[in-house]
């Protein structure tokens, strides 16, 4: 599997490179990073300068590159694993349009554990229809978007079971909690890789579902699994549920 890696010199780019180095079935043939100093001769600053033959693109760059990235993937007719979060509504619309031409894997979090957590949230809420729900996420102090894409995806899982659920981003001021409110709270500190909790509480008991990433390598490994999954797929949007189904 020949990979073009965008965000090559970023934190996650380095994690993907490390994961690839341990896999005999994968290799990075080109990196794209606007901030590249081309230290190892593999990375270029512009998509147009990446001419290597490839099977798939893995993106861990920045959402501001969405338009250029999608245009490049469509031009090369390459499957795209989109592992960047924080897209604007306009960028999300561009992604959906591109998926009509290329297979595109889209996930807020590439950890298999988060995929399992999402399923567990739905199961639990089906069993506790009257419970209150809060979502807490913690990340390192360099993370730009809040709440995290994963926290919003977990809220999406809540909304699948409770269509009337209302997201409350943080909480301040006076006012009682409303029955359909789902608080989403973000903590930024230190070097926390990623912790997500969904707290489900009734008057008599509380169930806390928690996932903690110990290293960013878990996201790199997941992106490689997604890339392999996309091989030979028809255009469309695929996600972790599809990956878990095989």
Image (spheres, rainbow, N blue to C red):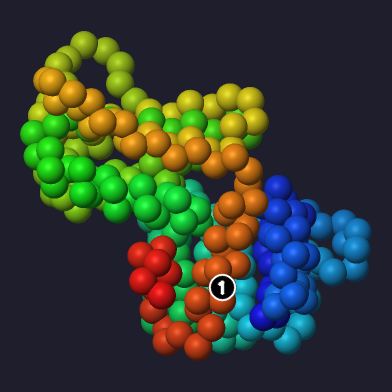
Q: Which residue is mark 1?
A: 227
Query: Is any atom of residue 200 visible in this view?
Result: yes
- The secondary structure type at the circle numbered 1 is helix
Q: Picture coordinates of residue 170 (x, y %)? A: 34, 25
Q: Is residue 29 left or right of residue 123?
A: right
Q: Picture coordinates of residue 49 (x, y %)? A: 78, 76
Direction top: furthest residue: 174
Residue visible at 59% across and 52% down?
A: 218
Residue visible at 40% across and 67% down?
A: 244
Residue visible at 44% across and 59% down?
A: 107
Q: Nearer the viewer, residue 110 or 172?
A: 110
Q: Quadrant of residue 57?
A: bottom right
Q: Quadrant of residue 5?
A: bottom right
Q: Is residue 34 above or below residue 155?
A: below
Point out the image quarter for the C terminus. bottom left
Residue visible at 74% across and 75% down?
A: 24
Q: Is residue 101 left or right of residue 121?
A: right
Q: Nearer the viewer, residue 33 or 141?
A: 141
Q: Picture coordinates of residue 205 (x, y %)? A: 18, 23
Badge 1: how crowded within 10 Å, few (<14), some, or many (20+)?
A: many
Q: Is residue 30 left or right of residue 217?
A: right
Q: Picture coordinates of residue 29 (x, y %)? A: 77, 76
Question: How many numbered circles does the render carry?
Answer: 1
Point out the image quarter for the N terminus. bottom right
Query: Is any atom of residue 156 visible in this view?
Result: no
Q: Nearer the viewer, residue 95 or 83?
A: 83
């Amino acid at each position: 599997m020949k990979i073009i890696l965008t965000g090559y010199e970023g934190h996650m780019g380095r994690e993907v490179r490390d994961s690839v180095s341990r896999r005999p079935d994968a290799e990075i043939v080109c990196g794209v990073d606007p901030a590249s100093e081309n230290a190892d001769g593999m990375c270029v600053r512009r998509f147009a300068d990446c001419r290597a033959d490839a099977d798939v693109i893995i993106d861990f760059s920045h959402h501001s590159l969405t338009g250029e990235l999608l245009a490049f993937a469509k031009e090369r007719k390459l499957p795209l694993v989109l592992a960047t979060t924080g897209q604007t509504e306009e960028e999300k619309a561009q992604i959906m349009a591109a998926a009509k031409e290329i297979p595109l894997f889209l996930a807020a979090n590439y950890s298999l554990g988060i995929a399992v957590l999402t399923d567990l949230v739905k199961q639990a809420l089906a069993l506790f229809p009257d419970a209150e729900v809060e979502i807490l996420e913690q990340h390192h102090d360099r993370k730009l978007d809040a709440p995290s894409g994963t926290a919003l995806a977990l809220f999406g899982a809540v909304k699948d079971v409770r269509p009337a659920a209302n997201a409350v981003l943080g909480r301040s001021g006076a006012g009682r909690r409303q029955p359909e409110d789902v608080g989403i709270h973000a903590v930024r500190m230190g070097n926390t890789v990623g912790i997500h909790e969904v707290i489900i509480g009734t008057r008599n008991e509380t169930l806390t579902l928690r996932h903690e990433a110990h290293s960013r390598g878990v996201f790199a490994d997941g992106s490689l699994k997604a890339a392999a999954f996309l091989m030979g797929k028809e255009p469309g949007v695929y996600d972790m549920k599809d990956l878990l189904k095989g």
